[in-house]
Image (cartoon, coloured by chain):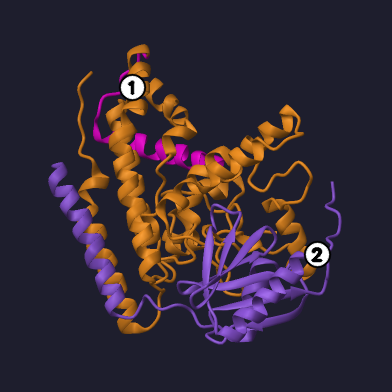
Amino acid sequence: MPLELLLTLVIGGITAIAVVLHLTGRSSQKVMTAAQAREAWLRQFPENHIAQLTLAEDGHAALVQLEDDTAPLGLVWSFGADTVARSLHDTKATRAKHGLHLRFADFSAPQVLLRLSAAETDAWLRQIVGADARPRAPKET
Amino acid sequence: MDHLSFPDVTQLAVPIFIAAILVEFLWIALKGRGGRYETRDAVTSLIMGAGSVASGILLGFIAWGFFMLLWRITPLDLGASVWVIALCFVLDDLRYYWVHRFGHRIRWVWASHVNHHSSQHYNLTTALRQTWTGTFTFMMVVRAPLVLLGFHPALVLFVGGINLVYQFWIHTEAIGKMPRWFEAVMNTPSHHRAHHGRNPRYLDCNYAGVFIIWDKMFGTFVPEQESDPVDYGLVYNIASFNPLRVAFHEWLAIYRDMTQPGLTLKQRLAYAFAPPGYSHDGSRDTSATLKAKHLARTPKDLGTPGF
């Protein structure tokens, strides 16, 4: 197949599929309830015991505190129509215009921008920074 | 027979791929079942597919040069009759089974294959979420016996292309089960859904390309269970739709693991070549430990398929 035709087909095809999906509402982010957020965390970390889960008002993220109080906080968030979860160990949290910007030391999960109310932003930042300052259990070797 | 040419079936199938994706999406939208689509996930998969074709065009000469070198060495030439093509197709499918199995059991090869499993969706776009870095796994050596046996390199690549095109249609939730005889012999949407599962039961199963018989022969077959719906994606899902991150994240992870201070040479090599999930301090899970931990939580699953 001539390269020009192949390129046209590929670019045209990707564009057409993207437009159709977007226009039919397939670009919206998953909105979680607290129970769904809990389930999403346990889907990733089935051995964890969750002590407290704080769901963002928009349902796109939740902060997770484990029963093991030496464990770092966790975050579960909407990733397209699905969810992902990460420990907040080694995470940089900064204020953004409408919430928090988290940067992970993880090439496969580089960052997430959380849309939070002003009160939520203050509370979440306090929790994240507070948890970061806690003494940790020594790492097993 | 030095000059033999066959069509590039994967490129010829591009219009069919695009049309089939639109048909599958329409079917799901109209019926309200049979799978899910998400815009960024689908676009990422499609870009990975396009990048894979581009990588084949740019780097294909390496494998081709290797095969032609073998072709010059071998005294055998089986020609290109219909029976030779059919035999080559079956043997190449056996080759695919083992390359795919290595792709899940050797981290160096997994680094290339992981991107195909990185979507949490399972639809026809997932089929096109293909590697950009396959050349660097050096898995072309597994094709060497076919060329040395007298199958022309062009024929070997041709049947490999048909194998990949066959696997396109099995990436769907829109088809439940095929007729029993077909499920018994061929790789089907049901068998391949299980392969894409991150559930402990489905880890490291159903490596087949076209014929599921290889999994049955080599003990890796796990039938899809109604009682354990497939949860698609990676054990540790990625959180990026960026194709560069999808393509290279595991390679970077290998580099970071291998260059940690204080490791022995054996440990460094194990980070590259041991099964995915290996860690020198036991802090991570392999598929074996994930299965064991699942059984500790759910002992009733012991003895059921996959455990």
Indicate the position of residue A27 as horizontal and vertical percent values: 37, 75
Residue B284 circle label? none
In three-dimensional space, the C-alpha distance between marks 2 and 1, rounded to whole angstroms, equals 50 Å
Q: Secondary structure at mark 2?
A: helix
Span highlighted in magenta in the image: B74-103
Taking depth in this image into account, of B3 and A87 the one nearest to the observer is A87
Residue B65 circle label? 1
Q: Main secondary structure of the magenta part?
A: helix
Q: Which residue occupies 35% across, 56% down?
A: B168
Give amino acid for label 2: Ala
Quarter assignment of residue B58: top left
Quarter assignment of residue A24: bottom left
Q: Secondary structure at mark 1?
A: helix
State left or right for residue B192 relative to residue A7.
right
**Residue underneath mark 2:** B296
State left or right for residue B112 relative to residue B156.
right
Indicate the position of residue B243 as horizontal and vertical percent values: 40, 53
What chain does badge 1 belong to?
B
Badge 2 density bin: few <14, some 14–19, many ≥20, Cα 10 Å: few
Up/down of B62 relative to B202, above or below:
above
Q: Which chain is orange?
A: B
Q: Is residue A49 in view from this perspective?
A: yes
Q: Which residue occupies 70% across, 60% down?
A: A89
Up/down of A119 relative to B106, above or below:
below
Taking depth in this image into account, of A111 and B301 the one nearest to the observer is A111
